Image (cartoon, rainbow, N blue to C red):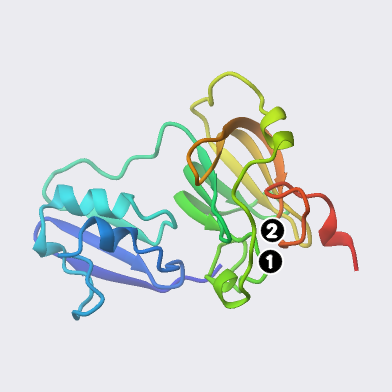
Amino acid sequence: MKSRIFRFESKDIVVTWDYVRCIHVEACIRSLPAVFNRDQRPWIDPSMATAGAVVAACEACPTGALHYERLDGGAAEQTPGRNRLTVSADGPLFARGDLQIVDESGQLVLKETRAALCRCGQSRNKPLCDGSHREIEFTADSTLTPAALERGDGDEPENCSLTIRVANPGPLMIRGSAELASDKGNECAHVRTGAFCCCGKSKNKPFCDGSHALP
């Protein structure tokens, strides 16, 4: 996976931004436009707000492109207690929690708290989304199908790590405990294991149906 990290510092906090992982969701701009402003240079100026406000804006970033380090003695960035997978309409699968992304052999390639996972199959930085879904005009409803809701594992998600294994070719395999939700916010299920489509072809999105193996 590629990365290109830039650093922006004030006396209270350091913000790091991964240019490659940013897909311009603009949650940071909406949250704190005084600090995150594409019309200024540098485009991130953490001195324009309190460290606490900058922290909240960074943590609003769903891709993990933004992280921070407190210089004022404030609390370090925390790992969310529960894992959540959010299916976005016409876009990636957003993951948040104690994320362990591993390759086919089980070797850790990324430990994160937030990530955007490719669903269209065209990202040049798999398994992470790079915004290619917009270029190819990828369409996929974020509504969870009845089958997805019925396969819910019941009870509440546990506090544990979520392993996301990359298969090539093949789906993203998850193991752990996570809440699976639609970005509409009104549908969710608890999943412990699953194979998630990352080729864009499945007719049972967000789950894999084996379409990646078809010619």
Figure quadrant of the N terminus: bottom right
Q: Residues within 10 Å of mark 1 (few under 14, many from 20)?
A: some
Q: Is residue 144 left or right of residue 47?
A: right
Of 72 and 188, nearer the camera is 188
Q: Which residue is depicted at the point 21% across and 40% down?
A: 75
Q: Position of residue 3 (x, y in %)?
A: 46, 70
Q: Position of residue 58 (x, y in %)?
A: 29, 54
- Disc 1/disc 2 C-alpha distance (Å): 5 Å
Work out which residue is located at the far top of the displayed protein and give it: 155
Q: Position of residue 81 (x, y in %)?
A: 42, 31
Q: Quadrant of residue 155?
A: top right
Residue picked out by circle 2: 198
Q: Is residue 6 left or right of residue 165?
A: left
First-in-chain label (1 vs 2): 1
Q: Quadrant of residue 136?
A: bottom right
Q: Residues within 10 Å of mark 2 (few under 14, many from 20)?
A: many
Disc 1, SS = loop
Figure quadrant of the C terminus: bottom right
Q: Could you tell me the amino acid type at mark 1?
A: Gly
Q: Could you tell me the amino acid type at mark 2?
A: Cys
Q: Is residue 52 left or right of residue 151?
A: left
Q: Is residue 77 left or right of residue 202?
A: left
Q: Which residue is depicted at the point 84% across and 58% down?
A: 211
**Which numbered tag is attached to residue 121?**
1
Disc 2, SS = loop
Q: Position of residue 139 (x, y in %)?
A: 64, 63
Of 135 and 15, nearer the camera is 135
Q: Which residue is depicted at the point 59% across and 50% down?
A: 142
Q: Are marks 1 and 2 in contact (CB under 8 Å)?
A: yes
